Image: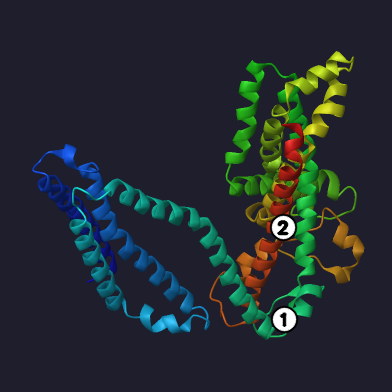
Amino acid sequence: MTLPLFVLLLLVVAASAYVAARARATASVGGDRRKLTSLPNSYGLNAAFAAAIPALGLIVVWLLLGRVSTQTEIFAFFRPLAERPQLLIAISALLAVGGFAYGIARATPGFRARIAAERWILILLISAASVAILTTLGIILSMLFETANFFGKYSWTEFFFGLTWSPDFRGNSQLGLLPLLWGTLYISLVALLVSVPVGLLAAIYMSEYANPRFRSFAKPAIEVLAGIPTIVYGLFALITVGPVLRDWFAIPMGLGESGSSVMTAGLVMGVMLIPFVSSLSDDIINSVPQSLRDGSLGLGATPSETIRRVVLPAALPGIVGAVLLAASRAIGETMIVVLGAGAAAAQFKEGIGEVVNPFQAMTTITVKIVSQLTGDTDFAAPETLVAFALGLTLFVFTLGLNVLALYIVRKYREQYE
């Protein structure tokens, strides 16, 4: 029996347990439901949950541990079990039968079936709430194991402090992180220099100056930018923004002849990030109590002085959090960088002028993660395993930004409530 077919059979068993337990509870009181401690449906739900949840839980845990055991030796003792699906089906079947019998046996008038059914529901809710935590843990563990394999084949000092990125699957690769990290931070900085002023000024206007009619139109229009696929932004950067910057700025100023550059990707990415900064800042500014504005205006301050000296300082922690969240979004962007900034890593050996030239083609960590894992690659080679080290580095960096944003918002939010 295949596993999908067995899962379907489990659902049939659970439905049968529901019907049988409900009928037994009703029959035990001669059809007079008033003599039951709980409603008949509660007896049925308790039996159905008892038959399905333990068996399905075992299947999920077994499959996850079996998958992990194939990737690392730490959980290798699960591998023989994972390779025997019939044993998994047999144990799950015993759990389902046991749960079925338990649910039917407890369908008596004095059993508090509603409380028991709610406990099963609580288990389901806890399991659902644990998905995000377990997923994050799985991501971290999978990257840690492969990163450990990478550093077993390549020096960590050369990775973290190397100034050259030159992978070669034939050997003698130079896998320095700094060129990719510099490109990531440089493009993200340009994007923030575009998105933060524009988004913040738009949020101030919509929250403090715009009438309700204009606001009801302008805010959804700005938020439409967040729904455009990033590949469309990348095509816009490649076809329109890149050639314009090259012909009007880079070539006349003698800074380059390529349409793929840091400035191209940064400008387009900044436009993409405007809704993140604008919407979050608008909500934060609107949450500032109106009494602070009224007090400032009552003391003779102008509306602009009230915004500058009262509203913005009160909303500053939330605005900083919005900016940091936008920064983490920019750091993880891929498609705009591929089409707008190219795939060449920064070359520190060519001089500081080329590295800081905004019209020079550069790439980011995310782009190289994709390129190193694309095609027919050997997962035992350091040139492939470096993608996991890059991913873990990027994960730690963006996680730090998100934690910092949450810390700032939570630390100062209560001062203005």
Could you tell me residue 129's position as x and y percent? 49, 53
Q: Residue at x 56, y 77 (%)?
A: 377
Most extreme residue toward the left, as rendered? 30
Q: How many marks?
A: 2
Residue type pointed to by label 2:
Gly
179 is higher (above) or lower (below) than 282:
below
Could you tell me residue 195's position as x and y percent? 75, 40
The front one of 70 and 348 is 70
Q: Residue at x 52, y 84 (%)?
A: 73
Q: Which residue is mark 2?
A: 400
Would residue 373 be visible to someone looking at this image?
A: no
Could you tell me residue 32's position as x and y percent? 12, 38
Q: Quadrant of residue 271?
A: top right
Work out whether mark 2 precedes mark 1 in sequence or the reverse, and give the earlier one: 1
Instruction: Report if the CB atoms under discs 2 and 1 are less than 8 Å apart.
Output: no
Q: Quadrant of the N terminus?
A: bottom left
Q: Secondary structure at mark 1?
A: loop
Residue type pointed to by label 1:
Ser
Q: Quadrant of residue 173?
A: bottom right
37 is higher (above) or lower (below) than 95:
above
Would residue 404 be visible to someone looking at this image?
A: yes
Q: Which residue is mark 1?
A: 173
